[in-house]
Image (cartoon, rainbow, N blue to C red):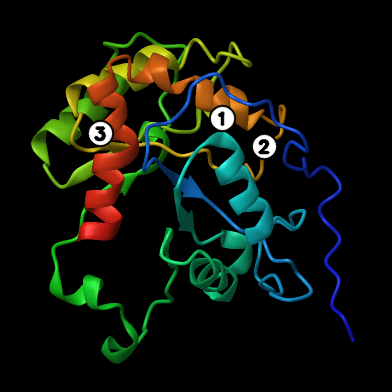
């Protein structure tokens, strides 16, 4: 019997036809924050999940990667799958070396089951979406200043300058109120920043972003070509491939 998982009634499906971005990522560019959901009849969603999404599998992810002009992905385990990493691992195997994954493990997992990286190397701390600043506040306000101080004081802390669609109050297509915050992080910590689409944008309530518009934000976050190369190529390759 085929399992079926009707999505939540208020679930917003990913954009069916994103625009082609004007910005072309440099060769080797990495979408360093994205997900795969199911499909549920192959990789069932976790019983303890807090949401049920629309299926968004590896083929759709890789088609978007190619359409936007990226060459690689970092696939983050989706919470709707709990600690069952099979959908993510299946995508990694299908990617032919062009993807890396961030898994979810349960407390109490035995040392024999842990990834070698977790037990033998110092672990960087990667903060999603710049720690989710309140972009209605000043750039030099106490909240964001505390986050930048945290990065200054801890050289192993990285930041994803993603999630403009989640943080913005001004909204699409340019998410202008997020840009100063992300640009400050990129320019201040150029060797410890990465970027990703966050496709298929789980738990969005206000709107579903156009991934072409999100890609066109990149030159506003990283105005200089050398910053773009660090953000999209050098840094994610160093963090996820060369390590």
Q: Percent position (x, y) of residue 94? A: 55, 69
Q: Is 42 placed left or right of 35 in the picture?
A: right
* Disc 1 element: helix
Q: Percent position (x, y) of residue 101? A: 42, 62
For the point 23% across and 78% down, the residue is 116
Compute the Cα span from label 3 to label 2.
29 Å
Q: Which residue is mark 2?
A: 204
Check whether the beta carbons of the residues at disc 1 and disc 2 lie within 8 A of each other. Answer: yes
Q: Which residue is mark 3?
A: 230
Of residues 90 and 55, the one drawn nearer to the viewer in this rendering: 90
Q: Looking at the image, is 220 positioned above or below residue 157?
A: above
Position of the C terminus, as image quadrant, is bottom left
For the point 23% across and 71% down, the residue is 117
Check whether the beta carbons of the residues at disc 1 and disc 3 lie within 8 A of each other. Answer: no
The first of marks 1 and 3 along the sequence is 1
For the point 37% across and 19% down, the residue is 221
Q: Which mark is residue 166?
A: 1
Q: Looking at the image, is 22 positioned above or below residue 14?
A: above
Q: Residues within 10 Å of mark 2 (few under 14, many from 20)?
A: some
Q: Residues within 10 Å of mark 1 (few under 14, many from 20)?
A: many
Q: Is 159 placed left or right of 50 in the picture?
A: left
The first of marks 1 and 2 along the sequence is 1
Of residues 95 and 210, the one drawn nearer to the viewer in this rendering: 95
Q: Is 138 placed left or right of 44 in the picture?
A: left
Compute the Cα span from label 1 to label 2.
7 Å
Q: Percent position (x, y) of residue 45? A: 69, 70
Which residue is at the far front?
27
Q: Percent position (x, y) of residue 237? A: 28, 50
Q: Is residue 19 visible?
A: yes
Which residue is at the far right?
1
Q: Nearer the viewer, mark 3 or mark 2?
A: 3
């Amino acid at each position: 019997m085929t399992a079926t998982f009707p999505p939540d009634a208020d679930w917003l499906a990913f954009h069916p036809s994103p625009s082609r971005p004007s910005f072309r990522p440099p060769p080797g560019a990495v979408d360093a924050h994205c997900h795969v959901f199911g499909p549920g009849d192959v990789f069932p969603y976790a019983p303890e999940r807090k949401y049920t999404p629309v299926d968004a599998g590896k083929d759709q992810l890789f088609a978007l990667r190619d359409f936007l002009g990226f060459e690689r992905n970092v696939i983050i385990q989706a919470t709707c799958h709990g600690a069952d990493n099979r959908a993510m691992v299946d995508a990694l195997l299908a990617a032919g070396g062009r993807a890396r994954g961030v898994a979810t493990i349960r407390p109490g997992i035995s040392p024999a089951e842990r990834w070698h990286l977790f037990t033998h190397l110092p672990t960087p701390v990667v903060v999603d979406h710049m720690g989710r600043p309140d972009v209605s506040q000043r750039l030099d306000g106490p909240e964001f200043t505390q986050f930048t101080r945290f990065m200054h004081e801890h050289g192993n802390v990285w930041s994803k300058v993603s999630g403009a669609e989640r943080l913005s109050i001004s909204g699409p297509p340019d998410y202008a109120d997020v840009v100063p915050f992300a640009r400050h992080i990129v320019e201040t910590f150029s060797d410890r920043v990465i970027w990703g689409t966050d496709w298929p944008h789980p738990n969005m309530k206000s709107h579903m972003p156009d991934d072409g518009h999100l890609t066109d934000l990149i030159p506003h976050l990283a105005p200089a070509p050398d910053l773009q190369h660090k953000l999209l190529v050098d840094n994610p390759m160093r963090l996820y491939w060369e390590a």
